[in-house]
C-alpha cells in the first residue's frame, strides 16, 4: 500500500454526534470556539460538524437561538439512529482533510486543536507519510461547573487503539477503512471495531496527552444502575457482533469473552451474589459521604458480571 503525500497544513473538521445533551453540549461548543492557535500554526482552519441524532430536549432550538456564538458550527440532523450513523454523516459532510472525533459531553482545553496538529505534523514527518492518527487524553469528571479542574486519575487510563472520545485522523483513511459499521445499533464497540480495520491498513497510533478533553457525566446515583446494567447487556451483544466480524483472541479479550474474565468477575461478584440489590446500602453510604466515583468503581464489580453474562448469552444465541 502506498503512502499519501503529507500536507504542510491541516484543516480540521471536528465531528460531534449529540443526543439530548444540550447543557453540557453548550460547554463543549464554547470550548471549541476559543481555541488558541500559534502564529506559525499548521492549522489552516477548522469547522465543527454537529450531528443531532434526533434530540428531543430542544438542542436544535437552542442552537438556532445562539448561532451567533458559534461561527465554526455547521449543524446537521437525523432521526435517532445512534452514534455510528451520526459520525458517518458527519464525515460525509466534513470539508476538512483531517477529522477529529469527540463526544458532545467532552470539554476541551484551549490548546486542544494545536496539540493534535503538532502531534500529527511530528508523527507524519517521522513516518514519512500520513498513515497515522493521534489519540488525546480523556479525563472523566462529574464537575459540571468546572469540568477542566479535574485531575488525571488512574481510572482515566485507556488502552484502546482507536476510540472516538478524542482522536484526530486523516479523512481519507476513514473512507478507505469503510467508516463506522452501522450494524452496531446498540451500545458499544463500533469505534474499536473500526480501529481493527484501521490497524489492518497499517495506521500508527500516536499518543497526544497534551490534547486533553474532560468527559463529563452526572455524579453516580442508584437511579442510574438500571440504565448502566442495560448498557452492559447491550455491550455484550455488540461485543459478539464485533467478534463475529473479527474472530481473534485479541477481540475476545476486549469484549471479555474468555474463561479468565468469566472466572474473575464470577469470583469478585460471588457468582452474582454481589449485585445491585445486595450492594445498594454500601453504594448509597459512599454516595452520601461525597464519594460517588468510588461507589461507581465498586458497582463495576457487578456491572462487569452482567457484561460477561451478556456476552456469553448473546454468543450462545448466534452459534
Image: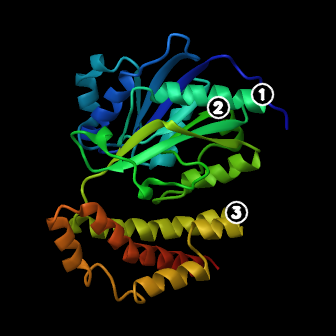
Residue 182 visible somewhere in the drawing? no
Q: Secondary structure at mark 1?
A: loop
Q: Secondary structure at mark 3?
A: loop
**Disc 2: which residue:** 170
**Disc 1: which residue:** 4
**Disc 3: which residue:** 246
Query: Which one is nearer the viewer's eye here, 179 or 33?
Result: 33
Numbered marks: total: 3
Sequence-wise, which precedes: disc 2 or disc 1? Answer: 1
Side of 197 where 309 appears, left or right: left
Few, some or many C-alpha atoms within 10 Å of disc 3 (few <14, some 14-19, many ≥20)? some
Query: Which one is nearer the viewer's eye here, 173 or 159?
Result: 159
Can you give x and y, in whole percent of width and height, for residue 49 in the image? 45, 29
Query: Which one is nearer the viewer's eye here, 9 or 13?
Result: 9
Cα separation, mark 3 vs mark 2, equals 24 Å
Q: Residue at x 28, y 19 (%)?
A: 69
Q: Residue at x 39, y 23 (%)?
A: 73
Cα separation, mark 2 vs mark 1, equals 10 Å
Q: Residue at x 56, y 32 (%)?
A: 99
Quadrant of the drawing holding the N terminus: top right
Disc 2 and disc 1 in contact, CB within 8 angstroms = yes
Few, some or many C-alpha atoms within 10 Å of disc 2 (few <14, some 14-19, many ≥20)? many
Q: Residue at x 71, y 38 (%)?
A: 176
Disc 3 and disc 2 in contact, CB within 8 angstroms = no
Can you give x and y, in whole percent of width and height, for residue 92 in the image? 57, 32
Sequence-wise, which precedes: disc 3 or disc 1? Answer: 1
Few, some or many C-alpha atoms within 10 Å of disc 1 (few <14, some 14-19, many ≥20)? few
Side of 207 where 224 appears, left or right: left
Amino acid at each position: 500500500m502506498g503512502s499519501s503525500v503529507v500536507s504542510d497544513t491541516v484543516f480540521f473538521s471536528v465531528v460531534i454526534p449529540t443526543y439530548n445533551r444540550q447543557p453540557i453540549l453548550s460547554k463543549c461548543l464554547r470550548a471549541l470556539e476559543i481555541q488558541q492557535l500559534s502564529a506559525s500554526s499548521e492549522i489552516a482552519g477548522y469547522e465543527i460538524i454537529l450531528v443531532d441524532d434526533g434530540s428531543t430536549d430542544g438542542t436544535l432550538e437552542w442552537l438556532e437561538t445562539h448561532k451567533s456564538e458559534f461561527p465554526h458550527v455547521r449543524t446537521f440532523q437525523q432521526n435517532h439512529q445512534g452514534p455510528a450513523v451520526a459520525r458517518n454523516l458527519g464525515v460525509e459532510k466534513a470539508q476538512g482533510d483531517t477529522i477529529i472525533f469527540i463526544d458532545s459531553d467532552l470539554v476541551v482545553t484551549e490548546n486542544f486543536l494545536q496539540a493534535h496538529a503538532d502531534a500529527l505534523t511530528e508523527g507524519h514527518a517521522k513516518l514519512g507519510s500520513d498513515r497515522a492518527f493521534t489519540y488525546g487524553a480523556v479525563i472523566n469528571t462529574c464537575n459540571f461547573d468546572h469540568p477542566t479542574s479535574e485531575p488525571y486519575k488512574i481510572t482515566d487510563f485507556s488502552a484502546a487503539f482507536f476510540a472516538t472520545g478524542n482522536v484526530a485522523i486523516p479523512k481519507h483513511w476513514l473512507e478507505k477503512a469503510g467508516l463506522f459499521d452501522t450494524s452496531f445499533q446498540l451500545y458499544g464497540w463500533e469505534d474499536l471495531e473500526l480501529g481493527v480495520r484501521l490497524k489492518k491498513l497499517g495506521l500508527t497510533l500516536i499518543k497526544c496527552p497534551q490534547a486533553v478533553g474532560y468527559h463529563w457525566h452526572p455524579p453516580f446515583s442508584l437511579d442510574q444502575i438500571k440504565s448502566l446494567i442495560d448498557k452492559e447487556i447491550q455491550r455484550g451483544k455488540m461485543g459478539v457482533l464485533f467478534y463475529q466480524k473479527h474472530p481473534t483472541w485479541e477481540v475476545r479479550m476486549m469484549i471479555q469473552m474468555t474463561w479468565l474474565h468469566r472466572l474473575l468477575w464470577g469470583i469478585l461478584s460471588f457468582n452474582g451474589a454481589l449485585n445491585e440489590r445486595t450492594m445498594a446500602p454500601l453504594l448509597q453510604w459512599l454516595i452520601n459521604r461525597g464519594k460517588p466515583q468510588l461507589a461507581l468503581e465498586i458497582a463495576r464489580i457487578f456491572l462487569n458480571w452482567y457484561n460477561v453474562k451478556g456476552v456469553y448469552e448473546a454468543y450462545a444465541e448466534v452459534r
